[in-house]
Image (spheres, rainbow, N blue to C red):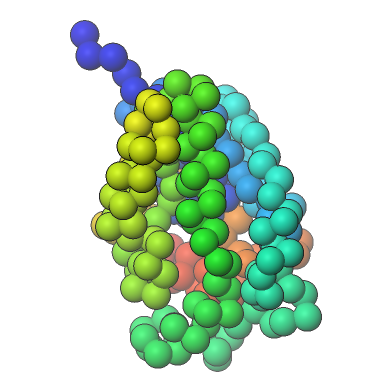
Amino acid sequence: MEEVRSAVVLLSSGLDSTVNLYCARRELNISKAITFNYGQRAARREIEHSQKICKVLNIEHNIIEILWLGEWTSTSLVNTKVNVPQGEEIKIDDYQKSLKTAKAVWVPNRNGIFLNIAAALAESLEADYVIPGFNKEEAVTFPDNTQEYLDALENCFSFSTASKVKTLCFTADKNKSEIVQLGRKLQVPFDLMWPCYLGEEKICQKCESCKRFLGALEA
């Protein structure tokens, strides 16, 4: 019988990472789910909702504090003196405007740092994969959301991890609506997700992340 592989899943409690967690649970053993706190506005909510999701699945959850990353960037995700693009500023179908709003929420090498930390943890746990939540919509303006990026990182891990940790993402080739459809098939708890860039009592429904999430639910 073929040995069941294991994984470390990066979980923010948003749509993409939550659906990837459920996909991974179906096909792999999950060693841990991890949520990063780099001082982002939504950190408290992301952690709270990630813990709830992991409790439903009985999966071990760890919080990884990397507050120094937030200190190195002026992104609106961290800097409360800078407004997160919202409302009319968001034009999901306008490439040039999307580039502008993407720049406002860009954190230098965030995904690279997240995945390298996850790979180190995976090797220590003898896990085979690290699994982020990516999608092809945001890959248009965020090049570190692509399958090509994951392939390049996996090549790096073949040098930087003795166990040659691999990357895996179940949604990198899907848009948000397709990810919602997959989530429904897997009975993912959409009510436990936190898709918002902000960390208020309720999701703002106006930031780009909220708009993509809500639009996909309605599609």
Q: Is residue 147 left or right of residue 130?
A: left
* Quadrant for the C terminus in the image: bottom left
Tell me which residue sits at (21%, 8%) in the image. Answer: 1
* 116, 195: nearer the viewer: 116
Is residue 179 left or right of 196 when viewed as pictured?
left
Residue 168: x and y in percent read 33, 42
Q: Determine which quarter of the picture holds residue 54.
A: top right
Q: Quadrant of residue 68?
A: bottom right
The answer, for residue 170, to whether it is visible in the render is no
Residue projecting furthest to the front: 159
**Residue at 58% over, 39% down:** 34
Which one is in front, 50 or 132?
132
Quarter location, residue 195 = bottom right
- Foreground pick, 77 / 157: 157
Q: Is residue 39 above or below residue 186?
A: below
Q: Is residue 121 visible?
A: yes
Residue placed farthest to the left in the image?
1
Q: Position of residue 67 (x, y in %)?
A: 73, 54
Residue furthest to the top in view is 1
Question: Residue 158 location in percent, x, y?
Answer: 33, 37
Residue 83 lies, in percent from the top left, at 69, 82
Q: Quick check: 88 left or right of 92? A: right
Question: Image point 42% across, 33% down: which residue?
Answer: 161
Q: Nearer the viewer, residue 95 or 205?
A: 95
Q: Residue at x 66, y 42 (%)?
A: 64
Badge count: 0
